[in-house]
Amino acid sequence: MTEKKTRRARKTQTNSIVEDIGPWSEIKLEIIKRYAEKYSKILTKQPGLHHAYIDAFSGPGVHRSRTTGEHVKGSPLNARLVNPPFEHYYFIDVDEDKTSFLQDIIGDEPDVSIYTRDCNIVLREDILPRFAYENFWKALCLLDPYGLDLDWEVIQTAGETRSVEVFINFPIHDINRNLVRTNPKEIKDAQLERMDRFWGDRSWYPLLYEKSNDLFGEELESRIAVANAVLPRTYLQRLKGVAGFSHVSGPLAMRNKTGAVVYYMFFASNKLVAKDIVDYIFNKWGNT
């Protein structure tokens, strides 16, 4: 293959893998980058401690801005540029094309582990157990699911380590599209199961729907609340009371150009200083 054809093939591959992102995603990347820099500086100064960066839905490492049309570094490449550096990086994506693309960008580096697997499995079984409190390893973990693709068990496991801090993107758009109905009987069983895995159980359901009887004694179910108004607030309490994180920031509403909320951003940690730093960063974009 000639050099010209090789360049054309690479360009075609890039265009097919690299996804467009809106301004809200660029803000998210900036927030994570800013905190990662603070986090690594603080951890590097603490003798005896080691620290890692985990990206559970890493993607190919590069995006394309809908605003400018230019390529934008994704969270894996931003993390690699943090100085002082993290001691290890874990990048995970279920899409082999994306992980192969990321691998080509990064190359074979001893401080990078790339997994083409379901992050819900690899995090619980292989990665998060390494960060047990007594192992003197700390981690900053980005959980940015493509939709309701994150299991609550991952959040629970991270909280139990007491050594892992997490950014979580709460996919309210997916919830509104697939689970908010005037008549809840219209919700597909598969969507109910997805939400149950994401939430951890079905305690979310009575927050949105209630049962009642009509004049003939027939049982009815109807929607009683707007998902945006009640679910993020309750999820914050679950991060504290169920997952066991002492300090939680958010929800920060990430909006599209029409003002609709695409997702809410949370941060959970067991360190008050970490929450204070993230609150300061969130406030730049109007913490809700």
Image: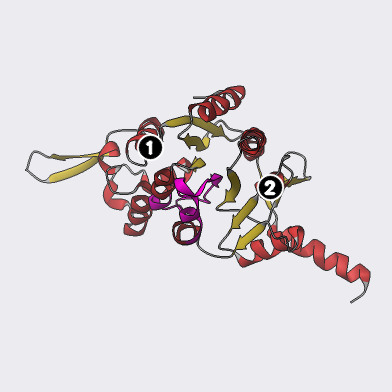
Q: Position of residue 95 (x, y in %)?
A: 59, 64
At x 49% / y 35%, what residue is drawn?
266
Which residue is identified by label 1? Answer: 235
Q: Classify mark 1: residues with Cα within 10 Å, few (<14), some (14-19) or many (20+).
A: some
Residue located farthest toward the bottom when viewing the structure as drawn: 1
Which residue is identified by label 2? Answer: 74
At x 63% / y 52%, what residue is drawn?
89
Q: Is residue 107 left or right of residue 177?
A: right
Q: Position of residue 94 (x, y in %)?
A: 55, 63
| Disc nearer the start of the sequence (2/1) | 2
- How many numbered marks are there? 2
Q: Nearer the viewer, residue 137 or 104?
A: 137
Stretch in magenta: 126-154
Q: Nearer the viewer, residue 50 or 196?
A: 50
At x 28% / y 37%, what residue is drawn?
207
Badge 1 amino acid? Tyr
**Gap in Å between the C-alphas at discs 2 and 1?**
26 Å
Q: Position of residue 64 (x, y in %)?
A: 73, 48
Q: Which mark is residue 83?
A: none
Q: Classify mark 2: residues with Cα within 10 Å, few (<14), some (14-19) or many (20+).
A: many
At x 53% / y 65%, what residue is drawn?
117
In the picture, the quarter occupied by the N terminus is bottom right
- Residue 125 on the magenta segment: no
